Amino acid sequence: MAKRVFQANSYTPTALADTTAATNATYQAIGAGSGTQRLNVAEIYLGGQNTASAVNIMVFARESTLGVIPTALATPNSDGPMDGATAALALPPVSYVAAGTGPKRDTAATSARLNLSFNSFGGIVRWVAYPGEEWVITGTTVSVSESLLSSNTGTAGVMGSHIVYEPF
């Protein structure tokens, strides 16, 4: 398979309690397209676009409740292969920034989370997995089949982000 990039061009995340559904256009969610599909997340990049200093307390985490009726991506957001010669996937991964009901972060203390906090006034954060230690999304079982990039607490500023992953 070939690596893909799921990017959200510009958005303002809002504080999100773990037990609250994410508000449309304030997050990125990505999930497997079938019960046997596996996505290896290799990189997450966040870039600040705010006009004043603001701390974005961003978290990439598994979901306890999946998004219901995810909305298809529309420009300027996108999800596509990094290699232009890549064949179309029979069951593409589910990547979205809006849904009929937004996803919720998993509240379990044993659930993995990545803290990606940064200053959105021009700051950046880039998480890159060591080969073999990628974040894995698999199947269609709640808590392992989708992951959510969202703001945990506080007031956040405008940002853009991308997630590089490879479906298997």
Image (cartoon, helix red, strand yellow):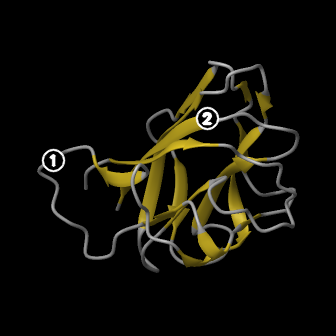
Q: Amino acid at mark 1?
A: Gly
Please say if 146 is above or below 118. below
Upstream in sequence: badge 2 or badge 1: 1
Q: Which residue is mark 2?
A: 159
Nearer the observer, 93 or 69: 69
Q: Nearer the viewer, mark 2 or mark 1?
A: 2
SS category of the residue bearing label 2: strand
Name the spot of residue 40 as percent of width and height, x first.
Answer: 45, 52
Name the spot of residue 146 as percent of width and height, x first.
Answer: 59, 65
Q: Residue furthest front?
A: 51
Q: Is residue 103 left or right of residue 74?
A: right
Q: Is residue 103 left or right of residue 126?
A: right
Q: Residue 31: which disc? A: none
Q: Amino acid at mark 2?
A: Met
Name the spot of residue 112 as percent of width and height, x first.
Answer: 72, 51
Name the spot of residue 89 as percent of width and height, x first.
Answer: 25, 69
**Residue 142 visible here:** yes
Nearer the observer, 68 or 121: 121
SS category of the residue bearing label 1: loop
Q: Residue at the spot x=43%, y=78% of the render?
A: 34
Dividing the picture into quarters, in which one does residue 11 lie? top right
Q: Residue at the spot x=82%, y=47% of the render?
A: 152
Label 2 neighbour load within 10 Å: few <14, some 14-19, many 20+: many
Q: Residue at the spot x=56%, y=28% of the render?
A: 126
Please say if 105 is above or below 117. below
Q: Is residue 126 left or right of residue 79?
A: right
Label 1 neighbour load within 10 Å: few <14, some 14-19, many 20+: few
Dividing the picture into quarters, in which one does residue 19 lie? bottom right
Q: For marks 2 and 1, give the CA distance.
A: 27 Å
Q: Which residue is mark 1?
A: 84
The mark total stands at 2
